[in-house]
Amino acid sequence: MTSKFRYVLDGIVPIINTPFDNNLDIDFASLERLIDASIADGIVGCIVPAVASEVGKLTANERRKLVESVIEFSRGRIEVITGVSSEDLDEARDLATHAIRVGCRAVLCRVPARLYGDDNGIFAFFSSLAGTGIEMLMIQDLDWTGYGMNVDLILRMFERIPVFLCLKIETVPAGAKYTQVLQATGGALHVSAGWALPQMIEALDRGVHAFNTTAVNRPFVRIYELHKAGRRGEAESLFEDVVPYLAWSHQHIDVSIQFLKRYCLKRGLFSTACVRPPILTYDDYHERCGDELIERLIAMEKGLRGSGARAAP
């Protein structure tokens, strides 16, 4: 068994949405408002860019500028993790090297789709990425329809790649895998939950350390705090209030992105709700249902103000 100590990043660690102006350029003023508001809501870190950031529609230069800006706007108040996911190892290494150069010590990288099922290829990919000089590697075990990497491979990488300290599990199902990974590593591997946020109470019961939300953070910060304080019933009660939002927005990632941008617009964080094409249609029914949920969320958040969230900067 490895002698590693568990990486400490416990709480809510959102993926940062990318705001665009009416010309579909990155809106950095809106980005700064989002970072400040998220920190005030109680997040402990963030990941940028990733799927919810519309990373596939960003140029390499935009990815770099986005990271630089989030680091600048965060001003050391939270842990910033740079997303370097790529099918190309050289590109992932270049993005990791840039992250180090601009002051980011931690990166997230998903398992390349081309390597699914190739344990030796996955091991070699992440071993090479770790050689860039990063201090923390978070591997994203993402499989929208299956169980992702086998636990033996995860344990092998954890024991042999020193900077592999965190695992973001997004598989189907996720719950049992959290437990298997935590047991296999003696609880020393930091585990976070992403797309399985609708199973947050179960994940907390299983010992998951962090949760990757997006722009909606305050309710999840409070749920996390209540559960960790041994007030599971209160955590579950509050979680039941956010379930309608989770159930609806998680119907598809494209719906989620467009919903969250409208939420940010309504909160006064974003100047537009613009997204880059191609993206699934967000029609009149989406607008009506989404707007109703946004109103409920904002009212809920107002009621939670002061219940553990940080003071606004």
Image (spheres, rainbow, N blue to C red):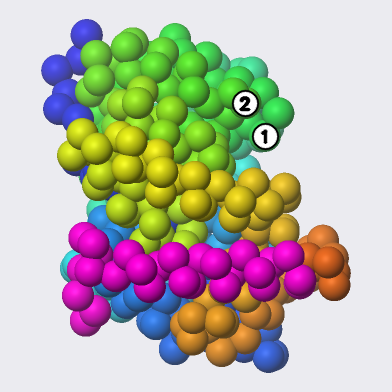
Local SS, label 1:
loop
Earlier-in-chain disc, 2 versus 1: 1
Residue 45 percent coordinates (x, y)? 30, 56
Dot 2 lies on which element?
loop
Q: Nearer the viewer, residue 222 or 184?
A: 222
Q: Amino acid at mark 1?
A: Trp
Q: Give the vertical position of 245 relative to 65 (above or below).
A: above
Looking at the image, residue 123 sits to the left or right of residue 79; the answer is right
Q: Is residue 104 visible?
A: no
Contact flag, marks 2 and 1 (Cβ < 8 Å): yes
Inspect the image, locate mark 2, and give the three-letter code of the amino acid beneath it.
Val
Q: Is residue 302 magenta?
A: yes
Nearer to the camera, 173 or 2: 173
Q: Which residues are magenta?
A: 287-313
Which quadrant would the C terminus be assigned to in this image? bottom left
What residue sits right under mark 1 in the picture? 144
